[in-house]
Image (cartoon, rainbow, N blue to C red):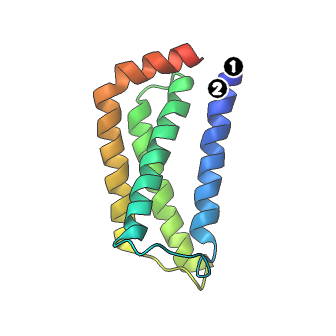
Amino acid sequence: MVKKLTLTAAGVCYMLLLIIGSLSNLTDVPKLSIELQDKITHFTAYALLCFVLFLMFESYKIRNTLKYSILVSIVFGTVIEFLQANLTSYRAFDIFDIIANVAGILIMAKLISLNKPLIVKKLETFM
């Protein structure tokens, strides 16, 4: 039970970090001179979100955990993009951010599906 709550807390905290990072004014934050850095960040952040949600849902033995992880991750990322456009004056909606999010989510989902028995086994030893 404690492990389920730990995974749930990790999932919720990660989502809160994404909300804060996505809706904060980051103009003063130094940027690396890496081409497509923003899209790589989106790709990675949402791939990780999909994985964290998968672990969280799996700990509760929910059916179709991977499908729910994909769905929640995509909806969450899309809602965040709309909130950026509507709640802030310093952030903007970017369809390419959504595309990067979805690409990260789908590639992570594929990796999870290829390794699901191993991941579930490791999760069960953790729990």
| Residue at x-position 47% and y-position 35% | 54
Q: Which dot marks residue 1?
A: 1
Residue at 34% in and 40% down: 109
Q: Which residue is mark 2?
A: 4
Mark 2: amino acid: Lys
Q: Secondary structure at mark 2?
A: helix
How far across and down, in percent of the image, does residue 61 sit? Answer: 52, 21
Could you tell me residue 113's position as x and y percent? 31, 31
Residue at the far front in the pictured view:
33
Residue 57: mark: none
Dot 1, crowdedness within 10 Å: few (<14), some or many (≥20)?
A: few
Q: What residue is shown at x 42% (from left), y 69% (from top)?
A: 38
Q: Is residue 4 above or below residue 17?
A: above
Say which element carries label 1.
loop
Rendered position, 123 above or below 54: above
Tell me which amino acid carries mark 1: Met
**For the residues marked 2 and 1, what is the alpha-carbon distance in whole angstroms?**
5 Å
Q: Is residue 13 left or right of residue 113?
A: right
Percent position of residue 75, x then y: 46, 55
Label 2–label 1 contact, CB within 8 A? yes
> Which image quarter is the C terminus in?
top right
